[in-house]
Image (cartoon, grey):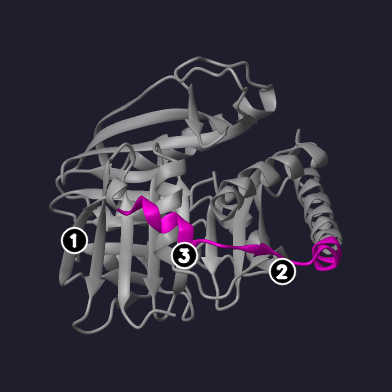
Amino acid sequence: MSTTNYVCYRLPEQKEYVRLEQHEGEPLALKSVKDLKDHHGFVFAPFQPTDKTPVWLLQADKVEKKVIREVCQRWSEVPDSPLTNRKLEEYSKLERLNYHLRFSLCKKYFLLGKVSKVVIARHVTEFSHTGQDPEALFLRACQLYPHQLIALVCLKQAGTWLMATPEVLLEGDGQNYHTMALAGTQKMPDNYQPGKEMKWSEKNRKEQRFVASYIGDTLQPYADELTHSHPHTTMAARLLHLCTDFNFKLKEDAQLADVLDALHPTPAVCGLPKEEARTIILVSEKDDRKYYSGFCGPYDPKGETRLFVTLRCMEINDNNYMLHAGGGIVPESKEKEEWRETEMKLNTMRDVLR
């Protein structure tokens, strides 16, 4: 584990990345998203803040910008080895059974009318390692996924996390802001052209409407001049999603931290109604999500904010990589299809390790 608290991040479509280090003091540990208030820095927030997983705010005293092409040769530093076939087979059977039980539980809650959507997450350990440089993995992810936020977060108290995420939680300049409803998933055809619209099942369209309605309703108390686009197809790695963009001005008496607290977690990573779905997740998931499905990025209420949901990520532990992914379950969902969707999402980080 690094003895320095640092972050590397590359914004979508950029040719350079930013490296932040904090040497003076420690990153701030905040009990809630609302506690961000007038602070600024790089935020690393969990799915559910607790004493063990607070909201972290790195306040850098060293900032560097680096061009990605200058360090491509570091790819050679990324050897990896899958776990033994026997371990993988045993783990896969248990993981598949656990997923089946949670999927069945969701169906029971739907019948009882408790929730209309729940997101099931998976946390999979598939690769072992012997101390490779996390920044080499970060650079490989930058090359593989030019259209997504790539972030490497290395904090003494939170661990080391790498993500390649397509989902904006909130971005803006202190007055004008943008967010998105991103839900619905299908595999990208080999001949897909960016910008081309795809046919989407009613299940995917319904899931996307849930998220879009939630975001629109949640923003109303904080937003002026709120507008939204029609749902459209967007690309993330080798997957396609449905996306609705929202643009608004922050009301003069509104606090950015309050907007974030109201939005997070969105139905794209939690479910609806939010509190009921969150309770089901916290009770039924065998592994703590920790910082998976939280959010991260540069945050400044009076300046530039670029926050993304922590998706398609992995936790780099002392001797293995734990991959994280999830998928939304609605009454129309079919278990085998949802399982395959999580496998496709896990491949985002698997491909970084291959």
Q: CA distance from mark 2 to mark 3?
A: 20 Å
Q: Based on the picture, tell me whether residue 222 belongs to the magenta stretch.
A: no
Q: Mark 1 packing: few (<14 Cα in 10 Å), some, or many (20+)?
A: few
Residue plotted at (73% across, 66% down): 83
Disc marking residue 175: none
Q: Is residue 178 visible?
A: yes
Depth check, mark 1 against mark 3: the one in front is 1
Q: Are marks 1 and 3 in contact (CB under 8 Å)?
A: no
**Direction from residue 351 to residue 66 in the image, left or right:** left
Q: Where are the magenta residues, as a range?
A: 71-91
Disc marking residue 161: 3
In the rendered image, residue 59, in percent from the top left (x then y), is placed at 21, 70
Give the residue type that dot 3 points to.
Answer: Trp
Q: Mark 3 packing: few (<14 Cα in 10 Å), some, or many (20+)?
A: many
Label 2 element class: loop
Mark before the other along the chain sequence, 1 or 3: 1
Mark before the other along the chain sequence, 2 or 3: 3
Depth check, mark 1 against mark 2: the one in front is 1
Residue position for label 2: 286
Nearest the eye: 184 or 235: 235
